[in-house]
Image: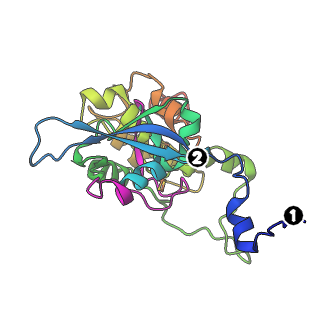
Amino acid sequence: MAVVAIPKASEEATSAPTPTTQPNTITLRISRFNPSNDSLPTFAEFKIPVQKWTTVLEAILHVKQNLDHSIAVRYSCRQASCGSCGMKINGKPALACYTKISEIGSKVVTVEPMSNFPIIRDLAVDFKQLFSDHKKMKPFIMRDDSEITPGTKEFVQTPKDLEKFLQFSYCIKCGLCNSACPTMATDESFIGPQGLAQAYRYVADNRDQGKKDRLKIVDQSHGIWRCHFAGSCSHVCPKGVDPAMAIQLLRGYLMGFRK
Ligand code: SF4
Ligand code: FES
């Protein structure tokens, strides 16, 4: 009589057929640059396994954890909210945590620091200028009185009023728009699409009374008139903000087409 060996539960689990999650292998090329030692960036190449859902950030972190821990990369939320992980991915500014390798459609993925920002090291860039320009736009409601509606303790605003600025308030200050901007590439003092879109966000808010101040800030030699309307800022924004449109609408106020 034939004896059939019955596998133990633990053996069954390990011998079960692998579902359709076999990893692919890609080449990840990471820009390496330390401004205190290097004169030019170089690329380090790594062969790494990726799944359908692997993001570029996860691929970089795989390298950091398993192959070279010295790579400098900035990230925090891993869910397209904090704006920390912006970089150029195969030449295009994008959030690394919001870009799946499988969607790039290439076996070679090259990551570089964002253009138009000073490089701190490798993929980490300096945001000082962006934050300072953002602050210059006075990103808060300016008014003398509180105008809080008695009983509700709220600023009453209609949905139509809200629509005028809502998309611009979604900005996470990732800097991708500034990185894509050709004017920023030639004028490092240019306010940039991020700052200009934020100026518009408050100018268009009917609770705000700081329009005059903000229009004065953007109407200067490295301000709003430097924009050539290339539109690349709006093209790369991961949050659906349209800085190119904000700049045109702001110009409308300065030229007297809008009140
Ligand atoms: S406008 Fe868009 S691309 Fe520019 S900083 Fe804000 S979220 Fe990023
Ligand atoms: S890690 Fe926060 S936006 Fe990517």
Q: Residue furthest front?
A: 1
In the displayed structure, does residue 102 sit left or right of residue 220?
A: right
In the displayed structure, does residue 72 sit left or right of residue 153?
A: left
**Residue at left offset 40%, top offset 50%:** 60
Q: Position of residue 106 (x, y in %)?
A: 50, 29
Indicate yes or no whether the magenta region holds residue 83. Answer: yes
Query: Is residue 97 something one can see in this rendering?
Result: yes
Query: Is residue 199 something one can see in this rendering?
Result: no
Residue nearest the viewer, comparing 13 with 77: 13
| Number of the front mark, 1 or 2 | 1
Q: Is residue 146 above or below residue 206?
A: below
- Spatial separation of the CA atoms under disc 1 and disc 2: 43 Å
The amino acid beneath tag 1 is: Ala
The residue pinned by badge 1 equals 2
**Residue at left offset 31%, top offset 46%:** 123
Q: Position of residue 259 (x, y in %)?
A: 55, 37
Residue nearest the viewer, comparing 102 with 211: 102
Q: What secondary structure predominates along the stretch shown in magenta?
A: loop
In the displayed structure, does residue 111 sit left or right of residue 236?
A: left
Q: Which region is colored magenta?
A: 64-91
The residue pinned by badge 2 equals 51
